[in-house]
Image: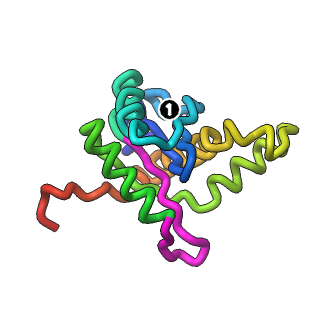
Amino acid sequence: MSGFRPGVRLGIDVGKARIGVARCDRDGLLAVPVETVARTDAAAAHIAQLAEEYSAMELLVGLPISLSGGETASTDDARAFAREVRAASGLEVRLVDERLSTVSAHAALRDAGRSQRSSRRIVDQVAAVVLLQQAIDVEKSTGAPAGAVLPDPQEPA
């Protein structure tokens, strides 16, 4: 486990209507679902409260990149929400490539015998679990944190 920074992290899967939230334990052994948050003006503040409740050290926000590696309107939306949640929480936010996390979540739920319709309420949480677990695994295998730190607008580039 060399290079792994112990501490709870929250994984956040940003969607247009819902935001999936997951957390890991202090040792990064397992990511688990926390809740699905409605995408409202209060969402960032609510996630900041969850971060405080779980004593999170950082937030990992999924960055939806197209399969070809390009950015989309969803990429811009996730970045904007990441800035909101950083401002609300005061925590470091890392942007993590989440390509296929929602696809993986749907596949896992389908394999568990759930229809896409019955999975709608939890698929965002499962996608957050997938992106967080991948980030933990990357840090444990490479010794470097996954993703890139969201730049602080107060610091010069």
Vertical position of residue 63 compared to residue 50: above or below: below
Residue 73 as seen in the image, left or right of residue 2? right
- Report the number of numbered marks: 1
Residue 25 is one of the magenta-drawn residues: no
The local secondary structure at tag 1 comes to: strand
Vertical position of residue 77 compared to residue 19: above or below: below
Region of the chain picked out in magenta, as a range: 59-73
Residue positioned 42% across, 64% down in the render: 76
Vertical position of residue 76 compared to residue 53: above or below: below
Q: Is the magenta stretch mostly helix, strand or loop?
A: loop
Task: Estimate the x, y position of residue 137 in percent, counting from the top left.
Answer: 53, 46
Residue positioned 13% across, 58% down in the render: 155
Quarter of the image where one finds residue 58: top left
Residue farthest toward the front in the current orientation of the protein: 41
Residue toward you, 81 or 64: 81
Task: Estimate the x, y position of residue 78 in percent, counting from the top left.
Answer: 44, 56
> On the rendered image, what quadrant is the N terminus found in?
top left
Residue farthest toward the right in the current orientation of the protein: 113
Residue positioned 67% across, 37% down in the render: 122
Quarter of the image where one finds residue 5: top left
Residue 63 is one of the magenta-drawn residues: yes
Q: How crowded is mark 1: few (under 14 residues within 10 Å), some or many (20 or more)?
A: many
> On the rendered image, what quadrant is the C terminus found in?
bottom left
